[in-house]
Amino acid sequence: MSSKNCCKPEAAQSQAELPLQPEGPALQAGVDEAGRGPLAGPVFAAAVILDAARPIAGLADSKRLSARRREQLAQAIEAQALACCVAQASVEEIERLNILQATMLAMQRAVAGLAIAPQLVLVDGNRTPALPMTAVAVVGGDAKVQAISAASILAKVYRDAWCMQAHRQWPQYGFAQHKGYGTALHLAALQQHGPCSVHRMGFAPVRRAVLSAGSAGSDRCCADPVC
């Protein structure tokens, strides 16, 4: 497991535009993931418990925020959250389990890594992982519930940081530009270089690149080949 318990058991934050938390237990965690769709890299998940006494302005669905704003909010969340944890499931686990189950595993790790155990977990989407406390799926939760918004921001920031690190190691793929998604640039790089060890071999575009690189000879595989 790779996780970061980023909480200080003091306080967390919220936002006026979104409800802090639905009616129910006082201690609620929001959970969201980042990186289910890309062709490479781990899938990340974050869990966050916010504090009504210390609101953060600007929490929103991470996809609606600029990269700079996400990073600013991530710093605020980490500094002031009652508890937060970012975890991941590896490429190997994605291959072994499938992307859905690996995502559930990353979410379980994020919740387990919280310094404070929540009474209720609110999960973005229509599925919840198996947890020792009550979990509720909230469709569109990253735009409805502040704790889920905070989790979406942390997960996205940490995954983007992974992509920048991957770009430094394998610049030929352009991870800094496409963040691992199946863009034209990424697909062209896969065709030219073949996949490397962080590509998800079970994903169809990567499998096609393996076949293409194999038929063209080993010179089309990358410096860290899996083909």
Image (spheres, helix red, strand yellow):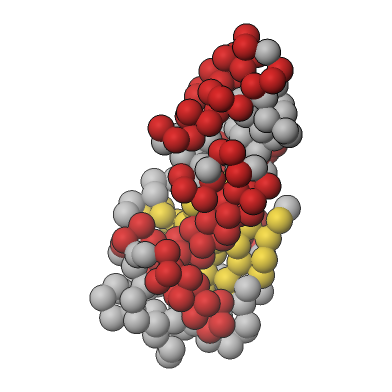
Q: Position of residue 207 (x, y in %)?
A: 57, 20
Q: Position of residue 165 (x, y in %)?
A: 63, 54
Q: Residue at x 39, y 82 (%)?
A: 56
User: Horizontal placement of 134 versus 112: left or right?
Assistant: left
Looking at the image, which is closer to me, 196 or 32? 196
Residue found at the very far left of the displayed protein: 17
User: Horizontal placement of 117 versus 142: left or right?
Assistant: right
Q: Residue at x 63, y 82 (%)?
A: 8
Residue found at the very far front of the displayed protein: 219
Q: Where, quadrant-wise, is the C terminus in this rendering?
A: top right
Q: Residue at x 68, y 30 (%)?
A: 222
- Residue 169 visible in the snapshot: yes
Q: Residue at x 52, y 69 (%)?
A: 48
Residue found at the very far bottom of the displayed protein: 53
Q: Is residue 142 above or below residue 127?
A: below
Quarter of the view holding residue 217: top right
Q: Is residue 103 above or below residue 73?
A: above
Q: Position of residue 162 (x, y in %)?
A: 60, 54
Looking at the image, which is closer to me, 143 or 160? 160
User: Horizontal placement of 5 versus 20: left or right?
Assistant: right
Q: Position of residue 139 (x, y in %)?
A: 33, 51
Looking at the image, which is closer to me, 205 or 7? 205
Q: Is residue 163 above or below residue 16?
A: above
Q: Is residue 166 above or below residue 8?
A: above
User: Horizontal placement of 51 versus 222: left or right?
Assistant: left
